[in-house]
Image (cartoon, helix red, strand yellow):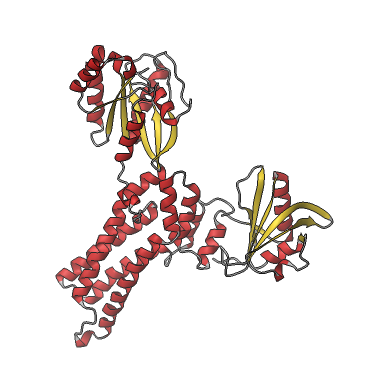
Amino acid sequence: MINQDTIVALATPSGAGAIAVIRLSGKEAISFADSCFKSVKSKKSLKNQKTHTIHLGHIVDGNRTIDEVLVSVFKNPNSYTGEDVVEISCHGSNYIQQEIIQLFLRQGCRMASAGEFTLRAFLNGKLDLSQAEAVADLIASDNEASHQIAMQQMRGGFSSEIAKLREELLNFASLIELELDFAEEDVEFADRTQFKELIERIRFVLKRLIDSFAVGNVIKNGIPVAIVGEPNVGKSTLLNALLNEERAIVSEIAGTTRDTIEDEISIGGIGFRFIDTAGIRETEDVVESIGIKKTFEKIEQAQVVIYLFDSTKFESQCNLFKVELEKIKNKYPLKPLIILANKVDKIDDTQLAKMQEEITDIKFLSAKTGFGVEQLTSTLLNLINTGALRNNETIVTNSRHYDALLKAFEEIDKVKEGLETGLSGDLLAIDIRQALYHFGEITGEITSDDLLGNIFANFCIGK
């Protein structure tokens, strides 16, 4: 799959800005850049410059100067892709960017495909496949936790753990297959006791990695939290208080929120996606009834539900609130439910105490003044098991890795059962090879063009 073309692409986001970076990679990258570059100080060509050096000069097209630039030179194999790489830092005008890219295309460069620079890094052995995938996760990370996980994976934390297990299993597989060559002599080269210990250790590590996906998936994608309740109880005000901005429409008119409004914030390094929904009530308003239907759809999608009610109306509507709560609890018994009494700044201590008697797991809030918002954010954070994250353990966030781990675990279980029942070496070897295959899928020892195409198609151009 290694293509000999020299590729070019914009490595920074498209659009105007202070600067832009244009990246070239391939055996002609330095030659192409050299033919269009005039240095301000040095008379040496870029081909004769040392690797990892930066040079000030101008990009020219014949007698026409396009821009003053900085050119960074990275010679193979000590570059991101393992090939010769040139990065041109120019002014961020759309016109300048396109003029420079078109200049290199005319010289014989080809526009890079999505993720092609990182694909070349993988094919040239600069990254394994799980590290390459972590590059995309790092670019997409929008909170501390997802950034931390992507950095750990890109540094090889996950792949090194898998590679170590694979190597140990491969050693035993070699010994068992060696036994097959001496089948008539009935000898054992692989110590079965040690092999059982290895299988148990592999099962333990795989189980931990598989279990970590539940945490990793919500960290990577953000935890959806649905804010529900009767109309005009302050759901939109709470959303604004959590976001610290006027994101939702707030008014005294019941049923103002006719559709769901979503926004995301980071709490303790974890992304939470708050969904402000239409109020739950009987209504003849067609538009509002559609909003209420969407409310239940959003509760279905959410991992946490906040039920908010107006504390000033608790005395008169206590039974209604309880009915609504029971409806949510019965319909979604496994979802964490946080019950919030809003507008507590408008009631006295006696009323607070009465509410606590009626609903023991209630929390108090004034979305308008901000009282109770900090306690709410702490409660939300405590719902997420971040122990593994704090201990810097490997956390799986990639569904492809998760699927491969599940398949590897299934094969390791077959090996364990085979050892316990005295299965012959040739049949054990089949299950071991299957487990090794699934380990190799994660790190990229085993790949196909279709797999690589699917993975790198999700990358941005220029990376």
Which image quadrant: the C terminus? bottom right
Residue at left offset 19%, top offset 69%: 418
Up-down: is 334 above or below 29? above
Q: Estimate the x, y position of residue 213 in percent, counting from the top left.
A: 33, 51
Measuring 24% from the left and 72% from the top, which residue is drawn there? Answer: 428
Compared across the picture, whether 191 is left or right of 391 comes to left
- Residue drawn at 70 percent across, 44 percent down: 93
Q: Viewed as shown, does residue 386 lie left or right of 188? A: right
Whether residue 317 is visible, yes or no, is yes
Residue 351 placement: quadrant: top left
Q: Can residue 303 be seen from the camera position used here?
A: no
Residue 49 is situated, as x and y percent measured from the top left of the image, at: 69, 69
Q: Position of residue 365 (x, y in %)?
A: 33, 24
Total tally of numbered discs in the picture? 0
Q: Seen from this angle, which residue lies furthest bottom?
A: 185
- Residue 29 drawn at (x, y percent): 67, 64
Between 154 and 241, the residue placed more toward the observer is: 241
Q: Residue reaching furthest front?
A: 349
Q: Is residue 320 left or right of residue 274?
A: left
Can you say whether 411 is above or below 191 in the image?
Answer: above
The residue closer to the viewer here, 366 or 408, is: 366
At a point 23% along the width and 29% down the height, the residue shown is 329
Residue 372 vertical placement versus 400 (above, below)? above
Q: Is residue 188 above or below residue 241?
A: below
Quarter of the image that includes the N terminus: bottom right
Front-most of 352 and 256? 352
